Image (spheres, rainbow, N blue to C red):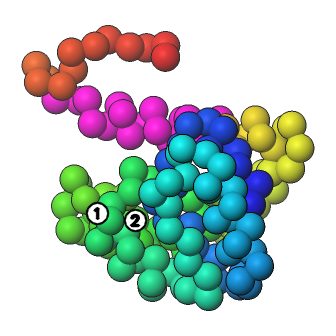
Amino acid sequence: IGMVKFLMELGAEPTHILCNHANKRWKKAIQAILAESPYGSGAEVHIGKDLWHFRSLVFADKPDFMIGNSYGKFIQRDTLYKGKEFEVPLIRIGFPIFDRHHLHRQTTYGYEGAMQILTTLVNTILERLDEDTRGMGTTDYNYDLVR
């Protein structure tokens, strides 16, 4: 619930919110939060579903990025296999994260946690922006070193 609120305060528009161990009360709470914000109007909440279900959602309705644990990297690989334009980058936040050094120790609570999450989100988006603007004479129209 906190992550959804935090992301919408930043202006993110959730597409799919999936929690495989949530109940109907949790779903109603998330839907109430989404209804309070114009950024939540297009979001769908899925409870009791797994990453295989999420994989089908990602292929049917491509988000800009996904937030999840290490298991999400297989969805990222599957989308990339279809083509670079279909790739959905994974932002590793949550548990377990065992495919990156020391991210399992990353703080996610309180002020320090919020700053860690914000830094991770922004840097991932900036990396993607850099990847998408590497074409010599076509997409390299800006020389941003500091954003």
Q: Is residue 15 above or below residue 141?
A: below
Of residue 36 and residue 138, the one placed in the foreground of this image is: 36
Q: Residue furthest right?
A: 110
Residue 133, position as x, y percentages in the image: 25, 29
Q: Residue at x 22, y 53 (%)?
A: 85
Queried whether the magenta region covers residue 122, the answer comes back as yes
Question: Which residue is tagged 1?
Answer: 80
Residue count near mark 2 (Cα–Cα under 10 Å), binned few <14, some 14–19, many ≥20: some
Q: Amino acid at mark 1?
A: Leu
Q: Under tag 2, what secondary structure?
A: helix
Q: Residue at x 21, y 15 (%)?
A: 141
Magenta-highlighted residues:
119-135
Secondary structure beneath disc 1? helix
Question: Which residue reaches farthest left?
Answer: 137
Q: Nearer the viewer, residue 36 or 47?
A: 36
Question: Are circles 2 and 1 on residues that touch, CB within 8 Å?
Answer: yes
Kind of residue sitting beneath label 2: Gln
Picture disc at residue 147: none
Residue 137 coordinates in the image, percent (x, y): 10, 19
Residue that badge 2 annotates: 76
Q: Residue at x 32, y 65 (%)?
A: 61
23 w.r.t. 44: above or below:
below
101 relative position to 124: left or right: right
Q: Nearer the viewer, residue 104 or 33?
A: 33
Q: Residues within 10 Å of mark 1 (few under 14, many from 20)?
A: some
Q: Quadrant of residue 75?
A: bottom left
Q: Is residue 127 left or right of residue 98?
A: left
